[in-house]
Amino acid sequence: MLIRAIFEDYTRGMVRDSNLDTLIQQGKIVGFFRSDGYVRVGHDQVRGTGGEYKGQDRRRHHTEYQ
């Protein structure tokens, strides 16, 4: 899939979704568009690798189903 992106020189273009992470890590992209709007690299949450959750675990454990 192609994603609309804004490059470091603020030109616009299209990049493959499979290349997006690499281009972000290399600093070649400053923003991109997704279904919920524009994402600014370094300001907005980019992708869901997530962080470490520090809250209470609310998931059911398999022993609770018996």
Image: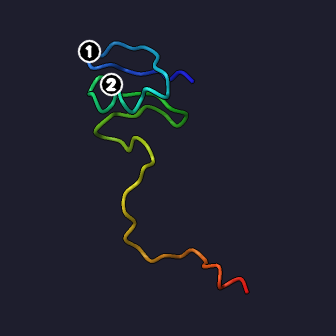
- Residue that badge 1 annotates: 9
What residue do we see at 48% from left, 28% from top?
18
List x then y, in percent, for residue 16: 49, 22
Q: Is residue 59 above or below residue 8?
A: below
Mark 1 is surrounded, within 10 Å at the Cα level, by few (under 14), some (14 to 19) or many (20 or more) other residues, namely few
Compute the Cα span from label 2 to label 1. 9 Å
Mark 2 is surrounded, within 10 Å at the Cα level, by few (under 14), some (14 to 19) or many (20 or more) other residues, namely many
- Mark 2 / mark 1, whichever is N-terminal: 1
Labelled disc at residue 51: none
Q: Say whether residue 1 is left or right of residue 51.
A: right
List x then y, in percent, for residue 40: 34, 33
**Considering depth in this image, is 54 or 62 the residue closer to the camera?**
62
What residue do we see at 50% from left, 32% from top?
34
What residue do we see at 52% from left, 37% from top?
36
Q: Is residue 47 above or below residue 21?
A: below
Q: Is residue 5 above or below residue 64?
A: above
At label 2, the amino acid type is Ile
User: Image quadrant of residue 7?
Assistant: top left
At label 1, the amino acid type is Asp
Q: Is residue 23 above or below residue 58?
A: above
Labelled disc at residue 29: 2
Which quadrant, please, contains the N terminus? top right
Dot 2: what SS? strand
Dot 1: what SS? loop
User: Image quadrant of residue 42?
Assistant: top left
Which quadrant, please, contains the C terminus? bottom right
What residue do we see at 26% from left, 15% from top?
9
List x then y, in percent, for residue 5: 41, 22
Q: Say whether residue 31 is left or right of residue 35.
A: left
